[in-house]
Image (tube, helix red, strand yellow):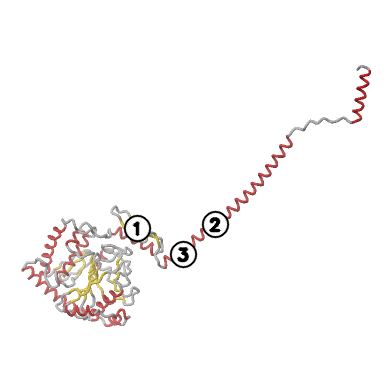
């Protein structure tokens, strides 16, 4: 659908309804913008304009030429749209007829997490939903070149217990829960916002979606656990597609409601029951017609077998808690998997990649402590080894001495136990001579 046409296939009656509805909402857009012009304070914008050169970069000549061709002024209001799966940040700008048209599209350099909303602090999810950016959320002195806070958590997030802070669109192409752009892209996006605030816009809307909410994409993700949340976002998506005017966004019963007005005496409360409310009849009729067309298209597309496989998405609060715990441990400098863990189809925690520490102060400190502890342990082990070796040497020497002593004792015992040799003693010479003489005398006498 073009910026100025109704839904494809509309009947003549539907086109008339759409024309009436669009004219009414174009008028509403102009009134809202006019009211916004009176509320911006000079102090807010001056603090933005007086910042660094990067925050005062000019829009490119090509963009300025395109704006003139589309009936836009340099300072007319803007709106931002983000599409995760397609990796796009779009800037839309209001034309003189009050409707918005796209003026620039940038490739997202990096975003962390998966498709699906942000649940809790540390889950590394980039938010999805409808957010508001005011001058005070712009940071011309960001450590990520330039940045602005998208306004998470909003009323819907708070009502549903979702936590987190400092969720940005920023430069430096580095992200842990934000939408990160190149520095050059961020200068252009920042310039669009700066000029719109200079023109009097007090706030602009950021619409963050998991993907372009076409029938084909909704069919691809119909079994995703985040599908009910995405269906809710789609109503706001469709309202903008129909009117090309940022939808009025409120929250009641912990859900988004779009382009509705509480009856007199009632107001919207994010956690309470929705009040009696109305919606402009042309818009309600156009939306119902659009919805019927979409449902028919969805039914047809859902039967196709050649749809692209869906991308990974976060599996609710449980997986968010697993990743948040990983983030805390990583921030403390503990050794964890380099990539965040996830949950498998069976609910088991899945980790991938090598283990390591974050390259931050805590990580370096923990690495130094671990190295010191390892060195201390090694020194203690080496000392214990030396002591053991010395003790073993002494014990060996003592054993050797005992062995030598035992050997000597054994030898002495053998000597003492041996029998004395028999030795015939020789008679003295005198006794020998007398013996021989006696023998001869005996012979003489016959004895």
The quarter of the displayed image where residue 161 is located: bottom left
Frontmost residue, 185 versus 221: 185
Instruction: Please tell me whether mark 3 or mark 1 is closer to you in this view.
Output: 1
**Spatial CA span between label 3 and label 1:** 25 Å
Q: Is residue 198 left or right of residue 375?
A: left
SS category of the residue bearing label 3: helix
Residue 43: x percent and y percent?
29, 82
Q: Which of 439 and 203 is in front in this view?
A: 439
The numbered mark, 3 or 2, whose residue comes first in the sequence reads 3
Q: Position of residue 35 (x, y in %)?
A: 19, 79
Could you tell whether 421 is left or right of 200 in the image? right
The C terminus, quarter of image: top right
Q: Residue 227 lies in what quarter of the image? A: bottom left
- Mark 1, Cα crowd under 10 Å, few <14 / some 14-19 / many 20+, is few
- The residue at the point 26 percent across, 62 percent down is 115
The residue located at (19%, 73%) in the rendering is: 102
Which numbered mark, 3 or 2, is in the foreground of this view? 2
Q: Find residue 169 and report its horizontal and vertical position in percent.
A: 29, 71
For this view, does 71 lie left or right of residue 52? left
Q: Would you name the residue on which mark 2 appears?
A: 382
Q: Nearer the viewer, residue 105 or 21?
A: 105
In the rendered image, which residue does mark 3 sit on? Answer: 368
Is residue 205 in view from this perspective? Answer: no
Judging by the rendered image, the residue that carries numbered circle 1 is 352
- Nearer-N-terminus badge (2/1): 1
Q: Report, in whole angstroms, how far the alpha carbon at label 3 lies from the one at label 2.
A: 21 Å
């Amino acid at each position: 659908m073009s910026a100025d046409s109704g839904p494809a296939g509309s009947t003549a009656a539907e086109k008339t309804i759409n024309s009436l509805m669009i004219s009414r909402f174009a008028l509403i857009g102009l009134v809202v913008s006019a009211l916004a012009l009176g509320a911006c304070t000079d102090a807010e914008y001056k603090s933005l304009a007086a910042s660094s050169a990067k925050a005062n970069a000019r829009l490119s000549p090509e963009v300025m030429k395109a704006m003139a061709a589309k009936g836009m002024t340099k300072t007319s209001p803007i709106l931002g749209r983000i599409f995760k799966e397609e990796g796009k940040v779009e800037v839309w700008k209001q034309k003189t007829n009050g409707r918005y048209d796209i003026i620039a599209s940038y490739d997202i350099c990096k975003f962390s997490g998966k498709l699906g909303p942000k649940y809790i602090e540390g889950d590394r999810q980039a938010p999805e939903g409808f957010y508001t950016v005011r001058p005070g959320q712009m940071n011309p002195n960001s450590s990520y070149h330039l940045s602005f806070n998208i306004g998470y958590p909003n009323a819907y997030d708070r009502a549903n217990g979702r936590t987190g802070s400092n969720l940005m669109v920023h430069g430096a192409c580095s992200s842990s829960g934000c939408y990160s752009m190149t520095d050059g892209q961020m200068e252009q996006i920042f310039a669009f916002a700066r000029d719109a605030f200079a023109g009097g816009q007090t706030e602009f809307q950021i619409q963050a979606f998991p993907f372009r909410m076409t029938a084909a994409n909704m069919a691809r993700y119909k079994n995703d656990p985040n599908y009910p949340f995405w269906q809710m976002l789609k109503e706001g998506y469709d309202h903008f597609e129909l009117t090309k005017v940022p939808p009025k966004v409120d929250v009641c019963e912990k859900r988004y409601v779009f382009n509705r007005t509480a009856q007199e005496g009632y107001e919207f409360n994010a956690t309470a029951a929705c009040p009696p409310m109305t919606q402009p009849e042309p818009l309600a009729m156009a939306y119902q017609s659009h919805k019927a067309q979409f449902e028919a298209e969805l039914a047809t597309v859902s039967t196709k077998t050649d749809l692209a496989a869906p991308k990974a998405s976060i599996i609710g609060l449980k997986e968010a808690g697993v990743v948040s715990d990983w983030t805390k441990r990583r921030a403390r400098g503990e050794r964890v998997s380099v990539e965040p863990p996830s949950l498998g189809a069976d609910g088991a925690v899945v980790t991938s990649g090598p283990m390591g520490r974050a390259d931050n102060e805590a990580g370096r400190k923990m690495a130094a402590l671990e190295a010191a502890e390892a060195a201390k342990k090694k020194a203690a082990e080496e000392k214990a080894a030396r002591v053991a070796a010395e003790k073993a040497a002494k014990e060996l020497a003592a054993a050797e001495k005992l062995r030598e002593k035992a050997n000597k004792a054994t030898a002495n015992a053998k000597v003492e136990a041996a029998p004395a040799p028999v030795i015939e003693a020789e008679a003295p010479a005198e006794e020998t001579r007398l013996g021989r003489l006696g023998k001869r005398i005996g012979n003489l006498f016959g004895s």
